[in-house]
Image (spheres, rainbow, N blue to C red):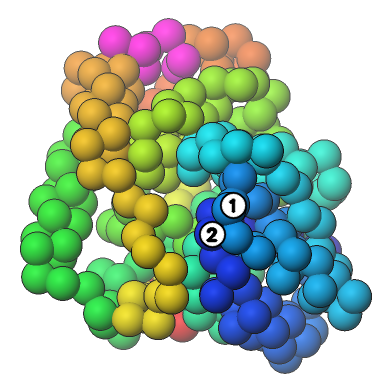
């Protein structure tokens, strides 16, 4: 089993020297075989060059965009690379590249995947989770966005919809690419809404979700925030119109298409026959 650590990066030259050694040490402590996949999204600093220095002592694949294409395309390219490079039994862990997320949680994510989950999210809302360095208005926005997502996209086993620090079973991502193709992440130009889009579309495939408690250290972030509020908000609205469980105009099409391609069971069965071990929380 190989753990692929997917890092979307844009102007993270100050974070790379701190984050990569922490990943290396966590992988060594867990006894994991791993490979880092860093996708440099048109950085205008020394992000790629600093990562290349660590390639002498760590297994790193560096993919480059000549211009900044946004988080959606960056994650899509990274996922496709991991699926091409990996094999059944592997796990893909997506982390932020700003050093605000602790790689020591990877062990708990892997354990949860091995218990039967297909997607495991690090959650600030599980017992033992939380965050530091987040300003009051950002907390309020995050709370409002979370409530919006839970109402329109109820997914069993999932509470933290916006955290991108997640583990995916390789087979689950392979199935998503086979079914959706280039439409797995459609809203590539709409800010961070791709973080929600992935879980919505994996839920349509019948993926089983779980969470582990996570403490976000936003005060450790060295680079400026890449969050584009208006494009992200517009992306959330478009996803609701297309894929909401209650009125999504494209949801029925994809359920029918998925059934034709994979023989998937009905949405009701998908939501009720998931292992209890995956829906239960687990502290890291």
Residue pictured at 16% horizontal, 62% vertical = 138
Using the image, determine if residue 164 lies above or below residue 248.
Answer: below
Query: Are circles 2 and 1 on residues that touch, CB within 8 Å?
Result: yes
**In the rendering, at what x and y percent does residue 36 appear?**
74, 63
Q: Magenta residues? A: 249-255
Residue 95 location (% of width, % of height): 54, 63
**In the rendered structure, which disc, 2 or 1, sits on the residue that comes first in sequence?**
2
Helix, strand or loop at mark 2? loop
Q: How far from the left and from the top, in percent, is residue 246? A: 19, 23
Residue matched to label 1: 43
**Residue sitting at 75 percent across and 47 percent down?**
63
Q: Is residue 138 left or right of residue 1?
A: left
Residue 158 visible from this viewpoint: no
Which quadrant would residue 6 be assigned to in this image?
bottom right
Residue at label 2?
Answer: 11
Q: Quadrant of the image for the N terminus?
A: bottom right
The reply to whether residue 222 is visible in this rendering is: yes
């Amino acid at each position: 089993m190989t753990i692929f650590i997917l890092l979307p990066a844009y102007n993270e030259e100050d974070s790379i020297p701190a984050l990569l050694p922490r990943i290396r040490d966590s992988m060594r402590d867990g006894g994991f075989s791993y490979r880092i996949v860093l996708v440099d999204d048109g950085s205008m600093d020394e992000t790629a060059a600093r990562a290349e220095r660590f390639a002498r002592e760590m297994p790193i694949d560096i993919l480059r965009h000549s211009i900044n294409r946004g988080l959606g395309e960056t994650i899509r390219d990274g996922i496709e690379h991991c699926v091409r490079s990996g094999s059944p039994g592997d796990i893909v862990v997506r982390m932020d590249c700003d050093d605000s997320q602790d790689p020591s949680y990877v062990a708990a994510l892997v354990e949860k995947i091995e218990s039967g989950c297909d997607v495991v999210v690090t959650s600030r809302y599980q017992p033992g989770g939380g965050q530091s360095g987040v300003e009051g208005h950002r907390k309020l926005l995050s709370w409002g966005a979370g409530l919006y997502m839970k109402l329109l996209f109820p997914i069993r086993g999932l509470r933290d919809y916006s955290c991108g620090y997640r583990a995916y079973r390789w087979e689950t991502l392979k199935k998503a690419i086979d079914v959706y193709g280039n439409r797995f992440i459609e809203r590539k130009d709409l800010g961070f809404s791709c973080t929600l889009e992935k879980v919505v579309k994996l839920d349509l495939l019948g993926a089983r979700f779980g969470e582990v408690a996570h403490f976000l250290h936003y005060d450790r972030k060295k680079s400026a925030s890449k969050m584009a509020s208006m494009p992200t908000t517009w992306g959330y609205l478009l996803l609701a119109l297309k894929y909401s469980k209650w009125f999504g105009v494209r949801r029925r099409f994809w359920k029918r298409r998925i059934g034709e391609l994979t023989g998937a069971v009905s949405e009701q069965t998908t939501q009720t026959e998931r292992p209890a071990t995956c829906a239960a929380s687990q502290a890291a």
